Amino acid sequence: MAALCRRAVVLFQTTKTLPYVLTAARKCSTAGTQYNYLIVDKRGENKNVGFIQLNRPKALNALCDGLMKEMNQALDAFENDAQVGAIIITGNEKSFAAGADIKEMQNRTFQECYGGNFLSHWNRVSTVRKPIIAAVNGFALGGGCELAMMCDIIYAGEKAQFGQPEILLGTVPGAGGTQRLTRAVGKSLAMEMVLTGDRISAKEAKESGLVSKIFPVEQLVEEALRCGEKIANNSKLVCAMAKEAVNAAFELTLTEGSRFEKRIFHATFATDDRKEGMTAFVEKRKANFKDN
Ligand code: HXC
C-alpha cells in the first residue's frame, strides 16, 4: 500500500502534461485515476488548490458525457482531500467550454432524455462544499456558461464570451442557464441572451455582475490560483460554512436567510479556528488555522 502511494507521488511529480494520475492520499488505495478529458493537478505553494483543466481542445472543450463523468470524479477526489481548500476549473485560451456536446445530443429522443434523466449528473459541480473558481478564457457557451455559473466565483480573461445559444439549436438551457443567469444579470439581459442566443463580452459580463474580475488572457489562471490560495489558506471548515450561507441567499427569504446566517455565525464559535483567528488578531500575528 505504502509502495503504491509512493509510486503515485513519483508519477505525479514527473507527469506535467500527460493525462494526470491523481495522487490524493485517498485515491492511492484505488491505484490512481486516469483522465482522458481533463488535466487534474494540485497547485499553489502548499499544493492546496485543486486544479481541473478541460482538455478537449479540438472540440473547443465541448462537454461530452465522458468529460462530465471525469469532472465529477475529480471533484469527488478534491472534496475528500483534506489538503485541498479551493478548486479551479478552467479551459484553454480559445475556449472554456463550447457547451454540451451537440453531436452526442443530435439524435436523442424525448423518451431517452426524460426516461434516463439526461444530464442529471451535471449538477455535481453545484453541490461541492469547497469553493470553486471558474477561470474563463474564450467561449463559455450553453452548458459551458452553465458550468461556470455553477462555480462560486467567475474570473474572466478579457477575450471571454458568455452566451446561452441553445435557442439557435431549437432547445433551451438545461443546466441552470435560465435560473442562475437570471439571478446573476437580471431579467432583461438574461431574457435577451436566452431568446436571441447573442453572446456578451467579458466587459459586459463584468458590468452585469456575472463575473467578479477580468484579467489579461495569459494572467487569468495565475490570478485564479492566487484567489484560490487565499481561500485555501483560511479555515476550510469555516469557508464551507461561509459558502453555505451565501448560497442560502438564493433559496431563502431575507428573514430566513439572516436567521440561517446567524446560526452559522454562532456555529463558528464551536470551532478551534474561530478562537485561533480572533486570538491571532489580538496577539498581532497571522492566524494558523487547523481546519478544526
Ligand atoms: C460538439 C462542438 C461544439 C459543441 C464546437 N464543436 N462546439 N462539438 N458540441 N457544443 C466542435 C465543432 O463541431 C468543430 O469540430 C470544432 O469544435 C471547432 O468548432 P468550429 O465551429 O469550427 O469553431 P469556430 O468557427 O471557431 O466557432 C466556435 C463556436 C462554434 C462559435 C463556439 O463552434 C459554436 O457555435 N459551437 C456551438 C456552441 C453551442 O451552441 N453551445 C450550446 C450547446 S447546447 P469539427 O470536428 O467540425 O472540426 C448546450 C445545452 C446544455 O450546451 C444543456 C445542459 C443540461
Image (cartoon, helix red, strand yellow):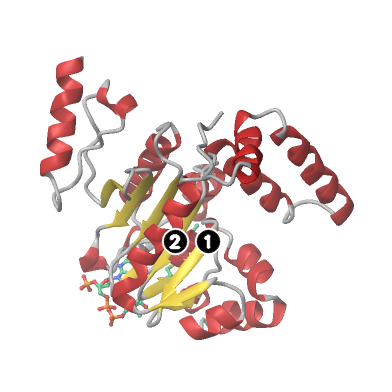
Q: Pointer 1 and pointer 2: residues touching (CB < 8 Å)?
A: yes
Q: Nearer the viewer, residue 115 or 155?
A: 155
The structure residue drawn at horizontal position 39% and vertical position 56%, both measured from the top left corner, is: 89
Q: Secondary structure at mark 2?
A: strand
- For residue 153, the mark is 1
- Residue 144: x, y in percent? 43, 65
- For residue 134, the mark is 2
- For residue 201, the mark is none
Judge from the rendering whether residue 3 lies leftward or rightward of residue 143; answer left or right: left
Please say whether residue 118 is visible from this viewpoint.
no
The structure residue drawn at horizontal position 39% and vertical position 66%, both measured from the top left corner, is: 223
Judge from the rendering whether residue 188 lies leftward or rightward of residue 12; answer left or right: right
* Quarter residue 224 falls in: bottom left
**287 is higher (above) or lower (below) than 149:** above
Q: Secondary structure at mark 1?
A: strand
Judge from the rendering whether residue 158 lies leftward or rightward of residue 3; answer left or right: right
Q: Nearer the viewer, residue 5 or 182?
A: 5
**190 is higher (above) or lower (below) than 57:** below
Quick check: which quadrant has ligand 1?
bottom left
* Mark 1 C-beta to ligand 1 under 8 Å: no
**Of callouts 1 and 2, the N-terminal one:** 2
Please say whether residue 18 is visible from this viewpoint.
yes
